[in-house]
Structures are given as C-alpha cells and as structure tokens.
Image: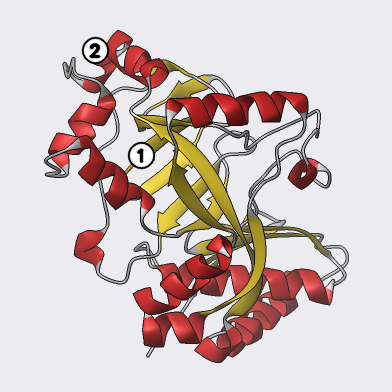
C-alpha cells in the first residue's frame, strides 16, 4: 500500500507556496505531485498564476491581492489529503519511443576531451559507466539501460530537458552512477546522459556533468516545430510522460536523422492512462503490459 508522510508546506516570499511531499526520490511522491498539480490546473483557481511540479514536490505562485495566502494554504492541504488515496493517482500520459545510438563516436570524443573534469578518468564515459555498474559487456549495459520504461518526473535546467527516472520496483536493479567531479564546458545537442538514477537528453549544446552514454536520433527541443509532437510546444517532454529508449544501429540512426531533417519522421507514441494502483499491485508486469502497447 502506498503510504505518504505529511506534506511540508512553506511560504516563499509574498507570492509562492512550496510543498515538499518527500525528500527521498520516490516515484509514488512524483505521482502525487503530478496528480495534485494537474488537479489544480483543471480547477483554474482565481489567484493562482503558475504551477511548477518537481520530482517529489511542487511550487505554487499566486497573487496575494486576489487570494489570501492562508486560505490558499488550507485549500492546498485539502487537495493534498485527497491525493493520499492511490486510487486518485491515475492520469493520462504519453508513451514515446526514443531511438538511441549507444556508445557513439561523438560522445566518446567529448568525454575524452574533457577527462580532466571527470577527475582523471581518461576512458570514454560509456566504458566508465559500464565498469562502474559491473556490466561485463557493452551489450549487457545497453540492455540494462534500455529495458525499463522511464517516467518524466520534471522539466528544467535548460528548456526542453526532461528528467527521466526508471520504473523499476526493485531498487537494487536501478542503474546509478556519479556525475562529473567538475562540469564539462560542452555537451552536444541530443547527447544522452546518466547521473545518479536519472537519464537526460541534452536539448541543445551546453555545459553538463552527466555521464555520456549515447546520442538520441530525434530532437527533444525544436523551435521550428517541424515534427508533429512539437506543433503545440517547443518541447517534446511533458511531466508524466513515459519514455522508452530503443537501441539502434549507426545505419538506422543516420536514416532517422535524415527523416528528422526532412520533416518526415513519425514518433512512435501511444496515449495511455497510467494507474498507480496497478503499478503498486503488479509492478514490472504492469510496465511490461504498457510497453507491449507501444510495440503494437
């Protein structure tokens, strides 16, 4: 049974209320944060200006001239209590397949170039991560990383960055690696990075400190909005999305890149209702059922 400790609420200046559901990264807390923030958006409460979900917390910006901060706090407490029942933690989501070329030459070159930021590790990040996680082969690591479904817990750092946490019920099976000791000054657009238990795809060239393990063949940020998922937003990801990383060969990677540049690529995407109840009761079997929908 899903159990939540009491949510901690704090006033932040004159316009913000911060709610911390838990300090530890728990997917159940993420589900609750997303469920609450989705509910608040649907209610369109006068005085609430912006709503920011995060991994295990959320932030509300409000206009104190329209709504009393203490009345709003009591309102948030009531919604929070309502969302303690796991039956209420169900919401519409999108499963999206992300083709990835693992152990590519581009991120290998970058990780070698900035090995000093890694603390003296001159080997490519992929090799470092493979050894750190105890995988005996490239194929074993790729299978371990690409097998799960990943939950987009929040967006941030740079526009379009999605923080993806693996939906794995056994904590010891989750891949976790340390970040760089000092951030490198350059990371190529679409590089796939791994830090802690989170996987991210860099939306554009930028500094970074996550271990580089591959290159996504598709964009996650597009100001030109050429492909269908970007028609409504510059960003591919939304909090609550489910991403599946699919390993591809270099030939398939190049083929997809050509389709992307021509504006003809079609994302493999399915709309689903994610059930916290089924995830709690069935665990990996429920995730397997969801991924079967993506394959069909």
Q: Nearer the viewer, residue 220 or 49?
A: 220
Q: Nearer the viewer, residue 98 or 170?
A: 98
Q: In the visual, does 67 lie left or right of 289?
A: right
Compute the Cα span from label 2 to label 1: 18 Å
Label 1, secondary structure: give it: strand
Expressed as whole percent of the image width and height from the top left, the position of residue 213 reads 35, 32
Q: Nearer the viewer, residue 158 or 267?
A: 267
Label 2, secondary structure: give it: helix
Task: Say above or below: 71 vs 20.
Answer: below
For residue 239, what is the image quadrant? Answer: bottom right
Expressed as whole percent of the image width and height from the top left, the position of residue 275 reads 54, 80
Q: Quadrant of the N terminus?
A: bottom left
The residue labelled by disc 1 is: 194
Asked whether residue 109 is in view, the answer is yes
Q: Number of numbered discs present?
A: 2
Expressed as whole percent of the image width and height from the top left, the position of residue 127 reads 20, 28
Expressed as whole percent of the image width and height from the top left, the position of residue 156 reads 57, 42
Cβ atoms under marks 2 and 1 closer than 8 Å: no
Q: In the visual, does 257 lie left or right of 210?
A: right
The residue labelled by disc 2 is: 116
Task: Say above or below: 83 vs 272.
Answer: below
For residue 221, what is the image quadrant? Answer: top right
Q: Residue at x 49, y 65 (%)?
A: 291
The crowding category of the residue bearing disc 2, from other C-alpha atoms within 10 Å (few below 14, some 14 to 19, many at least 20), is some
Q: Residue at x 52, y 54 (%)?
A: 243
Q: Residue at x 11, y 44 (%)?
A: 134
Mark closest to the chain's N terminus, 2 or 1: 2
Q: Residue at x 36, y 56 (%)?
A: 147
Q: Quadrant of the C terminus?
A: bottom right
- Colour approach in the figure: secondary structure
């Amino acid at each position: 049974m899903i159990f939540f400790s009491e949510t901690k609420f704090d006033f932040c200046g004159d316009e913000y209320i911060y709610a911390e559901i838990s300090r530890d990264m728990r997917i159940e807390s993420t589900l609750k944060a997303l469920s609450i923030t989705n509910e608040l958006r649907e209610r369109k409460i006068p005085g609430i200006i912006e709503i920011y979900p995060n991994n295990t917390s959320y932030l509300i910006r409000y206009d104190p001239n329209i709504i009393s901060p203490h009345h709003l706090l009591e309102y948030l407490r009531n919604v929070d209590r309502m969302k303690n029942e796991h039956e209420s933690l169900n919401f519409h989501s999108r499963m999206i397949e992300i083709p990835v070329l693992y152990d590519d030459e581009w991120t290998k070159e970058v990780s070698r170039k900035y090995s000093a930021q890694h603390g003296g590790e001159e080997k490519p990040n992929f090799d470092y991560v493979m050894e750190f996680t105890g995988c005996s082969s490239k194929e074993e690591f790729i299978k371990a990383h690409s097998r799960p479904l990943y939950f987009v817990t929040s967006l941030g750092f740079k526009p379009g960055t999605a923080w993806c946490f693996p939906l794995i019920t056994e904590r010891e099976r989750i891949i976790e690696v340390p970040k760089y000791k000092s951030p490198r000054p350059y990371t190529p657009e679409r590089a796939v990075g791994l830090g802690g238990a989170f996987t991210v795809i860099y939306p554009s060239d930028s500094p970074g400190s996550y271990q580089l393990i591959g290159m996504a063949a598709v964009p996650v940020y597009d100001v030109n909005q050429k492909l269908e998922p970007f028609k409504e937003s510059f960003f591919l990801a939304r909090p609550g999305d489910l991403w599946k990383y699919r390993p591809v060969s270099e030939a398939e990677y190049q083929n997809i890149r050509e389709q992307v540049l021509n504006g003809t690529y079609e994302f493999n995407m399915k709309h689903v209702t994610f059930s916290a109840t089924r995830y709690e009761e069935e665990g990996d079997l429920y995730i397997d059922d969801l991924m079967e929908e993506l394959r069909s």
